[in-house]
Image: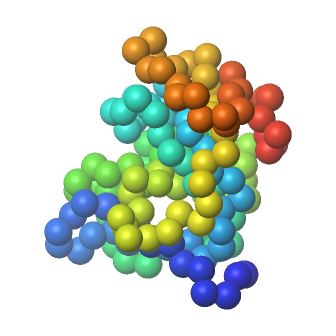
Amino acid sequence: MEQGFTATGGCRCDDNPVRYEYTTTPFEVHYCLCTDCTDVSGGALAIIAVVEKDGFNVTRGEEKIKNFDTKPTAHRKFCGECGTHMFLLVDIFADFVLVHVPTLDRDSEVGQEPDRWLFTDSKHPMVTIPDDGLPRYPGWEDSPNAA
């Protein structure tokens, strides 16, 4: 583990919020346009930090975390009280936790900048991907870090 790095986040509850942290820089951070992420988040895209499971911990409120399988292989974790979707586990990435970056504390470091766009074939027709120079991939299979 890296010395001194910690990212913290959690749900939106005022009383006894779920809190989590990761203590290693992410394996990768990407913009996700898959319908699974966008439907669950209610947004045009999701920003995902892929972090090692060994460096991820729920530090408070674990009893409030509920699971929703949006696919048989995608296990989304959210607060059972406020509904915040904080992270997910994906079967093919068994050693990683996929953290929804917007649930990090606003003053917390993510660990790195997004380096790609994934599931570009699934983007909503009203979304225009900016000309940011980042590579674009139609799904996981073409991404350099695909399992």
Q: Quadrant location of residue 23?
A: bottom right
* Residue 58 seen: no
Residue at 38%, 38% in the rendered image: 41
Q: Position of residue 146 (x, y in %)?
A: 79, 40
Residue displayed at 65% across by 68% down:
25
Residue positioned 56% across, 19% down in the render: 122
**In this view of the protein, which residue sits in the foreground, 135 or 144?**
135
Residue 58: give x, y in percent of width and height: 47, 72
Along the line of sight, the residue nearer the viewer: 79 or 102: 102
Q: Is residue 40 left or right of residue 72?
A: left
Compare residues 93 and 28 and report the one nearer the observer. Answer: 28
Q: How is the image coloured?
A: rainbow
**Quarter containing the N terminus:** bottom right
Residue sitting at the far top? 125
Does residue 98 appear left or right of residue 44 in this picture?
A: right
Q: Nearer the viewer, residue 63 or 27?
A: 27
Answer yes or no: is residue 106 visible: yes
How many callouts does the rendering have?
0
Residue lying at the far bottom of the rendered structure: 3
Q: Residue at x 39, y 57 (%)?
A: 103
Position of the C terminus by quadrant: top right
* Relative to 83, residue 70 above or below: above
138 relative to 98, above or below: above
Q: Height in image: 115 above or below 71?
A: below
Q: Position of residue 6 (x, y in %)?
A: 54, 78
Q: Tell me residue 4's x, y (percent).
A: 60, 87
